[in-house]
């Protein structure tokens, strides 16, 4: 694409408010209109509305942070967060993208898919990781998913950020296809894995509650075409979204 064409596109996006020119007059950042559109997606999405009360209940019961996420290509996008009450917490925010196989939410959705879908989304060899504890290969992931499939929840042990663990379960439609994933996140280490069972049971119950409410309302369905389109698109990872470790959690 020519420099002139790029300049025209940037100018159009700036005029519409989707981009803002930085103080140096050269660089751009996300504009207010893009934030407004993103907010509309979350507020008008029945999935986020229905899931929020269940996530709030989980957070109040455990003190941990709860997350709602959806697959987009080989990444998980955070759609909703209910922040925990622990004195030291770690927080991803709505819109953040992470490699799916590094999160409990993403792995829970992947666990509900067949092997051909996983091949299409992730490939068959190396996986994108974020920490030394991230699963390295498809074989590593397949073993973990097989081990936890009967339980219907999957752990995340320091795979997206050191010292942060979690458990996730899939929210599914009437056919059993994954719509989204929900997770609880807390401080811990990979050696704490045996203590995850009680949180796994809670997250499965929460995912079932949301799935049942969505089916009862009939306003949100897993679209085969849209899901396939999303899974075939490998969007770049937003590496700038690594959050700070202050009074927050995943």
Image (tube, rainbow, N blue to C red):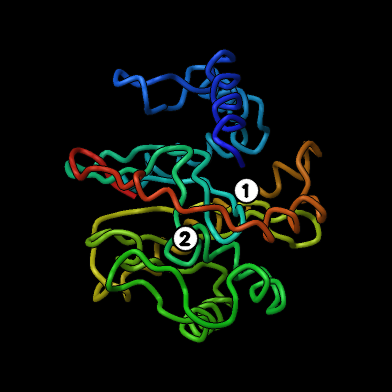
The image quadrant that residue 193 belongs to is bottom left
Q: Residue at x 39, y 68 (%)?
A: 129
Total number of numbered discs in the rendering: 2
Label 1 SS: helix
Rendered view: 15 above or below 249: above
Q: Residue furthest top?
A: 15
Q: Nearer the viewer, mark 1 or mark 2?
A: 2
- The span from disc 1 to disc 2 (Cα, nearest Å) is 26 Å
Rendered view: 28 above or below 206: above
Q: Give the class, few, some or many, for how many residues have Cα within 10 Å of label 2's Cα (few <14, many ≥20).
A: many
The image quadrant that residue 113 belongs to is bottom right
In which quadrant is the N terminus drawn?
top right
The spot of residue 240 in percent (x, y) is 34, 45
List the residue tagged with mark 2: 99
List the residue tagged with mark 1: 209
Residue 241 lies left or right of residue 46; in this view the side is left
Q: Residue at x 29, y 43 (%)?
A: 243
Rendered view: 141 above or below 242: below
The spot of residue 92 in percent (x, y) is 37, 44
The image quadrant that residue 10 belongs to is top right
Residue 11 lies left or right of residue 56; in this view the side is right
The spot of residue 201 in percent (x, y) is 48, 63
The spot of residue 134 in percent (x, y) is 36, 71
């Amino acid at each position: 694409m020519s420099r002139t064409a790029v300049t025209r596109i940037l100018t159009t996006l700036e005029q519409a408010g989707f981009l803002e020119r930085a103080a140096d007059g050269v660089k751009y950042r996300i504009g207010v209109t893009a934030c407004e559109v993103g907010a509309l997606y979350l507020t008008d999405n029945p999935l986020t509305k229905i899931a929020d009360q269940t996530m709030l209940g989980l957070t109040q019961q455990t003190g941990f942070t709860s997350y709602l996420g959806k697959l987009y290509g080989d990444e998980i996008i955070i759609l909703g967060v209910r922040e925990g009450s622990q004195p030291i917490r770690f927080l991803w925010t709505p819109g953040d993208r992470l490699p799916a196989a590094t999160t409990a939410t993403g792995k829970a959705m992947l666990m509900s898919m067949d092997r051909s879908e996983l091949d299409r989304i992730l490939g068959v060899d190396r996986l994108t990781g974020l920490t030394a504890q991230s699963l390295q290969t498809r074989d590593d992931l397949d073993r973990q998913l097989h081990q936890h499939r009967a339980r219907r929840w999957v752990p995340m042990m320091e795979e997206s950020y050191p010292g942060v663990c979690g458990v996730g379960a899939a929210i599914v439609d009437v056919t059993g296809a994954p719509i989204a994933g929900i997770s609880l996140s807390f401080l811990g280490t990979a050696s704490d894995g045996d203590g995850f069972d009680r949180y796994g049971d809670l997250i499965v119950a929460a995912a079932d509650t949301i799935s049942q409410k969505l089916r009862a309302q009939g306003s949100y369905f897993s679209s085969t075409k849209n899901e396939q389109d999303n899974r075939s698109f490998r969007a770049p990872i937003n590496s700038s979204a690594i959050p700070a470790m202050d009074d927050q959690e995943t």
